[in-house]
Image (spheres, rainbow, N blue to C red):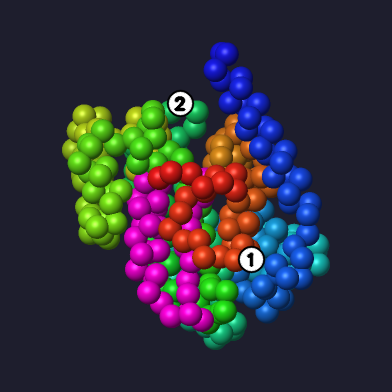
């Protein structure tokens, strides 16, 4: 109990600091964006995604809110429009390649591309201490392959910019390679995923495929996978690795065509995904994602953040 209280107090103090920082407006010098700047937020109909969309629109960007279900997405967009915010809606199912293609074509035709992409759409079927892997394939397909497929479809549409386009992936500390309590037991695999010399798309895909095969074979419990929210943790481990890999692949783009990609952990947010049991508000959970999207001098890429601070992968 004694060791937990200081950590809780430290987190609450940091969240108070962030709330204060959020009240400080960006100066004209810092504001690289305008009402013509287009930001896409996936899974924006509720929770963290809705709040990211609201905050970005409140800063003056034109936001495209997407949702798998059209009715929920339209309702969310209408709520934000009633606040006199520039928010549009388009249906997007990150599991459906045709839906991704249709969305990409629409945003190119309607807006001429985009400047900011926030990959927020995700699922988690476990509540509290539950650790079922019954929905593991859907979790991995949505949280990892969904981000990957949307990102790769939209990168060609990211518009030239002197400050660089931005991609923010909503992830989790549960996916850290070297976390103390929830990490891969396979030291060699951890090292391969950690090193940019050995990290590859094939390695990430093979890792999640091995996990899913072991789930199917009912042997995953002895496979050395994370012990907390196993399927979700594996999916976010893949997101973190993919973020670092894409940062490396995008690093040689010329000035004016730069794309910066980072990921962050919003914390245990009080949303439907956590059964409303979280200890962080959606407003605070969205903050670091919005901050990363709007960084005035964004030469930062391939990093992992929480509460506006860099965290080791």
Q: Secondary structure at mark 1?
A: loop
Q: Nearer the viewer, residue 225 or 80?
A: 225
Any magenta on residue 91? no
Marker count (numbered):
2
**Quadrant including the N terminus:** top right
Query: Where residue 129 is drawn, which disc sits there?
Result: 2
**Residue marked by disc 1:** 296
Residue 87 vs residue 221: left or right? Answer: right
Image coordinates of residue 179 in percent, x first then y, are: 39, 35
User: From where the camera sits, is residue 24 visible?
Assistant: yes
| Secondary structure of the residue carrying numbered label 2 | loop
Q: Which residue is pictured at 60% across the width and 69% down the height?
A: 39
* Residue at point 67%, 53% (across, down): 51
Q: Are marks 1 and 2 in contact (CB under 8 Å)?
A: no
Extent of the magenta region? 236-265
Relative to 85, 242 lies left or right? left
User: At 66% across and 37% down in the image, what residue appears?
Assistant: 14
Q: Is residue 183 above or below residue 149?
A: above
Q: Please state which of residues 235 and 240 is positioned toward the viewer in this rendering.
A: 240
Q: Judge whether residue 241 is colored magenta.
A: yes
The image quarter containing residue 91 is bottom right
Residue 109 % position (x, y): 54, 86
State the CA–CA distance, disc 1 to disc 2: 40 Å
User: Residue drawn 60% across and 66% down?
Assistant: 297
Quadrant of the image containing the C terminus = top left
- Could you say where residue 99 lies in the image, as x and y percent from the top left? 45, 70
**Horizontal relation, residue 133 to residue 72: left or right:** left
In this rendering, does residue 102 appear at all? no
């Amino acid at each position: 109990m004694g060791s937990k209280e200081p950590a809780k107090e430290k987190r609450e103090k940091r969240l108070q600091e962030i709330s204060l920082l959020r009240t400080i407006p960006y100066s004209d010098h810092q504001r690289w964006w305008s009402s013509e700047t287009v930001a896409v937020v996936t899974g924006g109909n509720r929770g963290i995604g809705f709040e990211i969309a609201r905050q970005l629109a409140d800063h003056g960007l034109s936001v495209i809110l997407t949702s798998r279900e059209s009715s929920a997405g339209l309702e969310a967009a209408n709520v934000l429009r009633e606040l006199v915010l520039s928010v549009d809606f388009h249906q997007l199912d990150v599991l459906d390649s045709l839906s991704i293609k249709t969305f990409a074509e629409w945003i190119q035709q309607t807006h001429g591309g985009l400047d900011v992409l926030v990959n927020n759409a995700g699922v988690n079927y476990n509540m509290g201490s539950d650790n079922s892997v019954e929905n593991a394939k859907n979790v991995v397909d949505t949280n990892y392959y969904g981000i990957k497929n949307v990102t790769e479809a939209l990168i060609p549409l990211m518009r030239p910019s002197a400050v660089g386009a931005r991609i923010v992936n909503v992830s989790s500390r549960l996916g850290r390679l070297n976390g103390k309590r929830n990490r891969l037991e396979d030291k060699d695999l951890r090292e391969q995923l950690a090193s940019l010399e050995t990290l590859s798309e094939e390695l990430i895909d093979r890792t999640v495929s091995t996990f899913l095969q072991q789930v199917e074979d009912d042997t995953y419990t002895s496979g050395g996978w994370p012990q907390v929210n196993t399927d979700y943790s594996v999916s976010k481990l893949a997101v973190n690795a993919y973020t670092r890999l894409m940062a490396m692949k995008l690093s040689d783009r010329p000035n004016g065509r730069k794309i910066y990609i980072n990921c962050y952990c919003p914390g245990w947010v009080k949303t439907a995904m956590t059964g409303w049991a979280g200890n962080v508000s959606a407003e605070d959970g969205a903050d670091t994602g919005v901050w990363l999207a709007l960084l005035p001098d964004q030469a930062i890429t391939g990093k992992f953040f929480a509460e506006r601070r860099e965290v080791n992968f």
